[in-house]
Amino acid sequence: MKKLFLLTAIAGIFAFTNASAQKDAAMNGPKLGIGAEFALPIGDFADGWKLGFGGSLLYQHPVAPNLNLTANAGYISFKSKEIPFIGGTVNMGYVPVKVGARYFLAENFYINGELGAAFGTKKGSSTMFAYSPGVGVEFPVADKSSIDLGARYEGWSNDGSLSFIGIRAAFNFGL
């Protein structure tokens, strides 16, 4: 009985989500978002690096009710903490390029996941595998435009790994 009630409740939520997501023109159709990126290093990466800054472009294309495929490219720059005994700092930049999916759980709230690569911009830098699960919200502001606020865990790995909590604030234009 409990399982039947739970399944009915879940089906009801999905039915409500599908019906309400179709109402808002800002939530339908392909979109291009231009955003500011902030990256807070965590784990071992936080031992030597400060907050990263950058920007990104994110294209969304709807493929099913509440489901968009995404393509994301940007730039993030990190500055090291002061190097012990030597002094000074070092900057490193990366160009992450990822593809993924965004699923809207409710009218404006989504979960997303992306896979791709992060390309180092300095001579001798390596290319790393990138993955990022996240959550966010889009606020419609005009007929086909919205403000997009998202948070994610992002990991990059090659021989070693670095990870950070990413925050993205963007403006989405309907196409």
Image: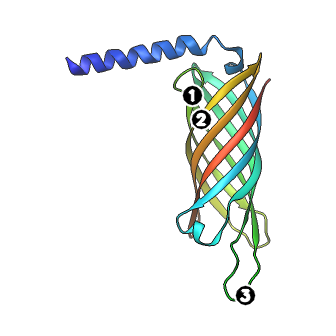
User: The residue under label 1 is which amino acid type?
Assistant: Phe
The residue that disc 2 covers is 136
Query: Marks 3/1: CA distance?
Result: 47 Å
The residue that disc 3 covers is 86
Q: Tally the marks.
A: 3
Left or right relative to 14: residue 102: right
- Mark 3 is surrounded, within 10 Å at the Cα level, by few (under 14), some (14 to 19) or many (20 or more) other residues, namely few
Which residue is at a point 66% across and 14% down the rendered structure image?
A: 24
Discs 3/1, front: 3
Which residue is at a point 68% across and 43% down the rendered structure image?
A: 168
Above or below: residue 67 compared with residue 143: below
* Res 173 quadrant in image: top right
Which residue is at a point 58% across and 63% down the rendered structure image?
A: 162
User: The residue under label 2 is which amino acid type?
Assistant: Gly
The image shows residue 122 at horizontal and vertical percentages of 79, 69
Front-most of 57 and 146?
146
The image shows residue 51 at horizontal and vertical percentages of 68, 60
Disc sitting over residue 109 in the figure: 1
Q: Earlier in the sequence, mark 2 or mark 3?
A: 3
Q: Kindly check if marks 1 and 2 are in contact, taking CB atoms under 8 A apart as contact.
A: yes
User: The residue under label 3 is which amino acid type?
Assistant: Ile
Quarter of the picture containing the C terminus is: top right
